[in-house]
Image (cartoon, grey):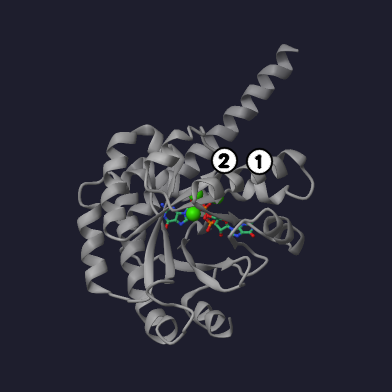
Amino acid sequence: EAKRLKCGVYVFNQQLDKKNARSAMIGKELNHALEKGEFSLVYQPQIDVVSKNVIGVEVLLRWHNEILHQVSPYEFIPIAESTGAILDIGNFVFEKAFEEFEDICNEIVKNNKKYTQANPFRLSINVSILQLSNENFLSNLFDLINKYDCENAKLMLEITETLIIENPRKIGTILEKIRQSGIEVSLDDFGTGYSSLSYLTKLPINELKIDQSFIHGLTTKKTNLTLVKSIINLGNSLGIKVLAEGVETNEELMILKNLKCQFIQGYYFSKPLNKTNLMNFLKEH
Ligand code: C2E
Ligand code: CA
Ligand code: CA
Ligand code: CA
């Protein structure tokens, strides 16, 4: 028994060492990734369930490093958060997204009657806790908004619940300033956090984004269906729009439609696309 245990611990330690070595490598490579131009952005369309109109896109970061090759943001974002690199990387995401969106706006959004000031195209950007609580975040953001003005578009920030729970008062103040400047807020990965629901009525939140882990089992797991149904009902009764992410099949779409979910995003409609492919997608939809 003891022998087996020792062996198990050894294997476990070995795996842990490997993981730590990779994390360290990622952290090191991340330090030069911006200057080497290793980051790019892709955009995933978000669709209105009833009209099938594209309501906007979520901006997703991509990293290709010469040694590590393609690294998933699920892996490198937490490391960038722990080293602080997320601040510069986050600035890059905003600057690049606004820069690329200028063409998208001029060539597509402006010429499509679907998008108006009352019904604008949404550019949705993920924001980490460190970014949002940084003192320069809002002024940088307002500078960008003034530099690139697109009449029939609006900015939406995707933030996670944990961010709010850690410092509700400070985040509340920042979110209030964000709301006053016409920027909307989507609560990302909804359902995976601590579910202290009281802030939903207190904070200016415009959308609940149901995490894809609940959508994938929608047709097979009864608990997923129950949970998704109650999130949609919660949103509908509070007047907060609900978006389901990770929709891959027509069956999932039909269930969400019946449950009165407003928006969806997922491979069923489109994978994340680079700027050129997004522009073609938008011209066809
Ligand atoms: P997220 O915000 O929950 O984004 C959704 C993830 O699901 C994306 O992964 C997207 O590509 C993927 N996805 C979309 N539709 C489907 C589908 O139908 N099926 C499946 N299986 N997956 C789908 P991605 O691009 O790898 O991003 C992972 C996470 O990294 C994001 O999760 C987000 O938390 C974070 N992230 C990505 N870009 C940024 C960024 O610019 N800034 C920050 N702070 N975080 C980012
Ligand atoms: Ca997101
Ligand atoms: Ca997320
Ligand atoms: Ca998610």
Label pair 1/2, CB-CB below 8 angstroms: yes
Q: What's the amino acid at mark 2?
A: Gly
At x 73%, y 62%, the residue is 249
Query: Disc 1 beta carbon < 8 A from ligand 4?
Result: no
Return the mark for residue 108.
none
Circle 1 residue: 227
In the image, 20: left or right of 267? Answer: left
Amino acid residing under circle 1: Leu
**Quadrant housing the N terminus:** top right
Q: Secondary structure at mark 1?
A: helix
Residue beneath the point at 51% across and 77% down: 278
| Up/down of 239 relative to 7, above or below | below
**In-image side of 269 versus 29 (left or right):** right
* Residue 84 percent coordinates (x, y): 31, 45
Mark 2 secondary-structure assignment: loop
* Rendering coords of residue 203 (x, y %): 37, 43
